[in-house]
Image (cartoon, coloured by chain):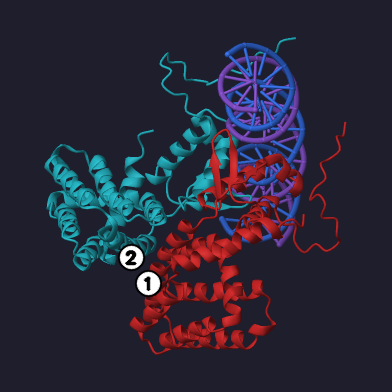
Chain colours: A red, B cyan, C blue, D purple
DNA sequence: GTCGTTTCTATTGTCGACAATTCTGATTGG
DNA sequence: CCAATCAGAATTGTCGACAATAGAAACGAC
């Protein structure tokens, strides 16, 4: 007796065989983005069955993805009560910025010490080009470029652990950075800071580059509070487009 | 028709009702310790069913725990091939030490800036007492005290994110630290470094404390290589006691 | 004897089921 | 009107089942 074989690759009935994309990684990435963008409201309880239905999978891959996101600090967990969205508060942002500043300083110093002239020149060129096109970028795109600038330096440091930790911080502060990018867009002074950092790196001036980087990242508590205010407004107003 | 109700809290048939301990957290903690101590050999494939049988649970909690450990970098994962023990190599240890040095420097500086006199005095007293008892401690216990010293400072920094990241690094280098502790045990000079750091903190001498901390943590590539050699020997000889 | 192919076996990925626990809200007593 | 209590509903924790995939072994051609 033949039992009907389970429909493989469900839903993806388009002819193009580009790539099946395993559901596990896909689910993880999808939930990760939701958490990064606060598509869950702060401290909101996350319903596993609802999320599973929304993504057309069972609870198993959902739970595995959520567990991972717990250790990435994007999600909270209480035993027998389930998963919750992380909070959204000033202290965390200030503390993360402090750690980030230290790591990014180390990053530039190592990059200056280890990167080739060509690599540093490429960094300057790439950012110059990005700035020239800045007006044509959406805020999301500009945020991505901002993040990429810092990640490139972290990679040039030659220390993958450093880069990995910075990426972890980046995903956690992605949302606030989006807001900051829009704030600074009008001022437009801020993106010249990247150019200055890059030029100091080309000149192999480690102390100056580190100082510039620190000042670039350091955030006053007042600024953080204003950003959080703006962020909360977006979270509780903007997301009603479901 | 009654179906037999599933046996609750299996195995724990002892009369003492101290604490059931949920299997999920228990499994996670157990696997975590195994990974920390390299009870899995480097790059060894981890069989889910075997591990599940060993811990008397199904694969679900096993997989969830393993997923968490993946993002903690204690475990590796390849889709459709499963979970693997992390490698054990010099580069990673050197890179982690570099990051750790930076974070610990920041840690002492913040602690000096924020901790009360009482808290710092307590740190000194506790370590003095620990040193006095050092000879009665096993290497494992001594390693734990070493880790605790640094974690206490991280907590005094007042930045939980900093402390969390250092704890993450600590779990990854726990095994090599065990080896280093035994190495230094004969020299016995190394633990006076902790005292010096603590005294500099009491004196609120941030620059000196930071410098001492850096020198305490910094590790030469040669030292790392020798430690790795010793570690590999233990992993492939010692663990045959199953 | 070695390389490539095919068949068989072991392992992972995902699912649905059900017990244990928590949450909801209705009811009762003060 | 408020607090405590207690059913009933919703949700999580864990399990066993099975298909899809990877790995190993047997086979055969050269």
Which residue, given by chain and number where applicable, does mark 2 sit on? B102
Could you say which quadrant of the image residue C26 lies in?
top right
Q: Which residue is mark 1?
A: A106
Specify the quadrant that holds the N terminus of chain B. Answer: top right
Closer to the camera in the image, A231 or B122: A231
In this rendering, do the residues under marks 1 and 2 share a single chain? Answer: no
Q: Is residue A86 above or below residue A207?
A: above
Q: In this orientation, which residue lies closer to the viewer: A230 or B236?
A: A230
Crowd around label 2: few <14 · some 14–19 · many ≥20 (10 Å): many
Is residue B121 shown left or right of residue D25?
left
**Residue ID at (13%, 51%):** B188
Observer-nearest residue: B115 or B61? B115
Provide residue A47's location: percent of width, then percent of height: 67, 41
Task: Give the residue at x 52% y 52%.
Answer: A73
Q: Is residue B218 left or right of residue A58?
A: left
- The subunit letter for the residue under badge 2 reads B
Residue B196 placed where, x, y %? 15, 57
The part of the image, by quadrant, that contains residue A21 is: bottom right
Q: Secondary structure at mark 2?
A: helix
- Label 1: how many Cα within 10 Å (few below 14, some 14–19, many 20+): many
Q: In the rendered image, is residue B221 in sight? A: yes
The C terminus of chain B: image quadrant = top left
Residue A152 image point, x, y percent: 51, 75
């Amino acid at each position: 007796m033949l039992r009907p074989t389970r429909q493989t690759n469900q839903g993806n009935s388009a002819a193009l065989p580009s790539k099946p994309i395993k559901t596990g990684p896909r689910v993880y990435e999808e939930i990760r983005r939701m958490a990064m963008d606060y598509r869950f409201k702060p401290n909101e309880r996350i319903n596993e069955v609802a999320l599973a239905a929304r993504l057309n999978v069972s609870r198993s891959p959902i739970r595995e993805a959520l567990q991972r996101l717990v250790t990435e600090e994007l999600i909270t967990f209480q035993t027998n009560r389930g998963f919750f969205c992380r909070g959204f508060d000033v202290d965390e942002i200030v503390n993360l910025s402090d750690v980030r500043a230290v790591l990014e300083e180390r990053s530039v110093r190592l990059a200056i010490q280890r990167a080739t002239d060509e690599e540093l020149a490429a960094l300057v060129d790439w950012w110059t080009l990005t700035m020239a096109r800045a007006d044509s970028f959406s805020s999301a795109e500009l945020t991505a470029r901002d993040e990429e600038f810092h990640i490139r330096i972290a990679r040039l440091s030659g220390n993958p652990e450093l880069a990995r930790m910075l990426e972890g911080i980046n995903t956690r502060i992605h949302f606030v950075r989006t807001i900051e990018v829009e704030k600074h867009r009008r001022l437009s002074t801020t993106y010249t800071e990247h150019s200055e950092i890059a030029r100091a790196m080309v000149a192999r001036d480690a102390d100056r580059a580190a100082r510039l980087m620190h000042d670039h990242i350091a955030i006053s508590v007042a600024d953080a509070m204003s950003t959080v205010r703006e962020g909360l407004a977006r979270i509780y107003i903007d997301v009603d487009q479901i």
